[in-house]
Amino acid sequence: MYAFSLQNVLANKTHTHTLVIFFPMELPRILTTSQVIFILAATILLGSDKVDGRRHSHREWDYFEYCAISCRSHTASLADFGGVGDGTTSNTRAFQTAVDHLSQFESDGGSMLFVPPGKWLTGSFNLTSHFTLFLHKDAVLLASQDENEWAVIEPLPSYGRGRDTEGGRYISLIFGTNLTDVIITGDNGTIDGQGETWWNKFHKGELTYTRPYLIEIMYSENVQISNLTLVNSPSWNVHPVYCSNVIVQGLTILAPVTSPNTDGINPDSCTNTRIEDCYIVSGDDCIAVKSGWDQYGISFAMPTKRLVIRRLTCISPFSAVIALGSEMSGGIEDVRAEQIVAIDSESGIRIKTAVGRGGYVKDIYVRGMTMKTMKWAFWMTGNYGSHPDNNYDPNALPLISNINYRDMVAENVTMAAKLEGISGDPFTGICISNVTIELAKKPKKVIWNCTDVEGVSSGVVPLPCGQLPEVSAECNFPEESLPIDNVEIQTCSYYRRKYSSTENDHVLKHL
């Protein structure tokens, strides 16, 4: 015989009931673990409404599946730690207490913190390793507007200072550093940065420190951020920095198009990153690839490389759909973007750099892009400026080479391209092929503006500038996959008994 036991700890903690079911030895060979658990659950559900002469009504099971790089053995709800989802009570302590408690399971199958329906006001809180934060579809995290709930941390070493001000920066709403296997996901739950107060302070010059981001993960590996809606971030939305093996998937990111610096997703000095199936409306670049700022980035010397971007839809009337830089002093290489839809945006792809940046942007491949209502399809800027201080090296010139754009269509475009390299430091190896750009009714007089650039073109309409002569060849796009594409996503299960308001929730193990 095969025995399987499950303890059912009721709200009255003086009573512990263990259900033991005996199966024939052959049964484990024909039922999966999940099916066995379902049999147990059904048995408990039918048989446990009456225990010790008391009837426990209004009980039901909360079960759902979700996709993740790792499943967890232990779960808890924010409500178990005193969380109150009324939109006004601070839950900062509840979040941190929950994470601290669940950190004990790092080496025991990991843990998941479930955020149930409600509006959960909170300041910043830190994550732990082998951990999943999961937001129910009706859960809303509301970022506190009380600056006392936002610690001030040191500037990033590859930047030397904050982006808004000199000195430190406010910690992000959801923060983690030196982690392994961390997941932030949900059933399209919402994280609301309530950024308007921060935007107003930025415009008025009233910021003491740099504004917080919604999510920042530093010095970590095996990171997943997926299936969430992010709205009204004070500044950048998603910022993995100094990380490896990162998957960002299925995000909806929304901010007013006039909001300052509300970049969507900014992979920064990261290796092996995959961004896919995202919809972004932003006041700045939808995706900005970065690697440090002037002499600080040069010294830190950590590039962003092996980055995949696919199935992105972006609206950004005053910025780029995909930007490379301007903080690129540690280097950017091997970026592959495809199946991109750009709507009502300033530019489709933009390379931003300047004298003093150093570093490089090389081996960039973009294909299968559709653009509708654009100022520029392609934009390269060698005079972006914006330095952290006056100590940058004027002899630190960036290397821009092997830039490949192919298989694109655009309509209602004011100007096909503005390609401006650096005098004495031209941008080289530019290739544009099989691209058709339909101009707006009132286009610029100069359709292609090219200075200090070198390259080729093939099958491009309208005909490019003389610096990109016609050849009979298409631009490159690597066919071999990158390591991050080989990371498998599992189907995980959350299984938990829900109690009425008179009883407490209790944790069951994941399937």
Image: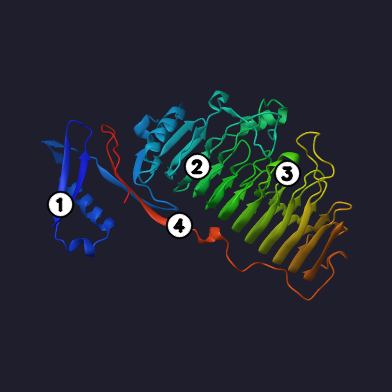
Q: What element does badge 1 sit on?
A: strand
Give the amino acid at mark 3: Ile
Give the amino acid at mark 1: Ile
Mark 2 and mark 4 lie on one chain; the one further toward the N terminus is 2
- What residue sits 80% from the left and 35% below the top? 391
Q: In this view, does 331 lie above or below 369?
A: above
Closer to the observer: label 1 or label 2? 2
Spot occupied by residue 431 in the image (x, y as percentages of width and height): 77, 65
Mark 4 and mark 3 lie on one chain; the one further toward the N terminus is 3
Q: How far is disc 1 from disc 2 in space, using C-alphas? A: 40 Å
Q: How far is disc 4 from disc 3 in space, using C-alphas? A: 35 Å
Q: Residue 21 carries which label?
A: 1
Which residue, given by chain and number where applicable, does mark 3 sit on?
A: 298
Which residue, given by chain and number where applicable, does mark 4 sit on?
A: 489
Q: Is residue 183 something that shows in the picture? A: no
Q: How far is disc 4 from disc 1 in space, using C-alphas? A: 33 Å
Mark 1 and mark 2 lie on one chain; the one further toward the N terminus is 1
Q: Are marks 3 and 2 in contact (CB under 8 Å)?
A: no
Q: Residues within 10 Å of mark 4 (few under 14, many from 20)?
A: few
Q: How far is disc 3 from disc 2 in space, using C-alphas? A: 25 Å
Which quadrant of the structure image shows residue 28? Answer: bottom left
Spot occupied by residue 195 in the image (x, y as percentages of width and height): 60, 34
Q: Do the residues labelled 1 and 3 touch (CB within 8 Å)?
A: no
